Image (cartoon, helix red, strand yellow):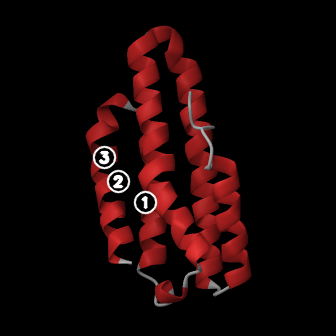
Amino acid sequence: MSALRKQTQALVLEINASAGDLPPIAVVLARAVTDTVASVLDSPEVDRLDIGVRVAVHAVLTDYVPGSIRSYIGAVRAAGDPAVHAATAAVVDQLTTLRASVGDLAAASNERDLQALQVHGRFLEDKFGGSELDL
């Protein structure tokens, strides 16, 4: 789990470094994701997490959230003002979905509901496993 903790810390640093280029709500949502992941990783049940959940958390930390942030910044820089509204809506939608899904994972972890953890892990993979994060 130490690798996931390090990935969480690295993502927090990336979010903080990108904060000036992101809408404030995106920063708040992205940090809510990292805070929730950190709470799962700090739970006493962390060693019992299903491998599918671990893979989903890894993807959230290394692909889904950073991909959303980087795509937003790239879209706004490339297109300028015309892209800001659409890009903001897309990144907020993506981060809201990730926040809710990671929140469900945390709730299931707290309740030690392994079946719910597995279901949410599969949801994350199905929802974001492809290239749907492209703006």
Does residue 33 appear in this view?
A: no
Where residue 26 sits in the image (x, y, percent)?
47, 40
Q: Which residue is mark 3?
A: 14
Image height check: is 132 above or below 53? above
Label 2: few (<14), some (14–19) or many (≥20) C-alpha neighbours in 10 Å: many
Query: Residue at the location (73% across, 70% down)?
Result: 119
Contact (CB < 8 A) between labels 3 and 2?
yes
Query: Dividing the picture into quarters, in which one does residue 111 lie?
Result: bottom right
Contact (CB < 8 A) between labels 3 and 1?
no
Q: Which residue is mark 1?
A: 34
Query: Residue at the location (50% across, 56% down)?
Result: 60
Query: Residue at the location (47% across, 67% down)?
Result: 37
Where residue 75 sits in the image (x, y, percent)?
46, 21
Q: Earlier in the sequence, mark 3 or mark 1?
A: 3
> What residue type is disc 1 on?
Thr
Q: CA–CA distance between discs 2 and 1? A: 7 Å
Image height check: is 75 above or below 124? above
> What residue type is disc 3 on?
Glu
For residue 98, side relative to residue 81 (left or right): right
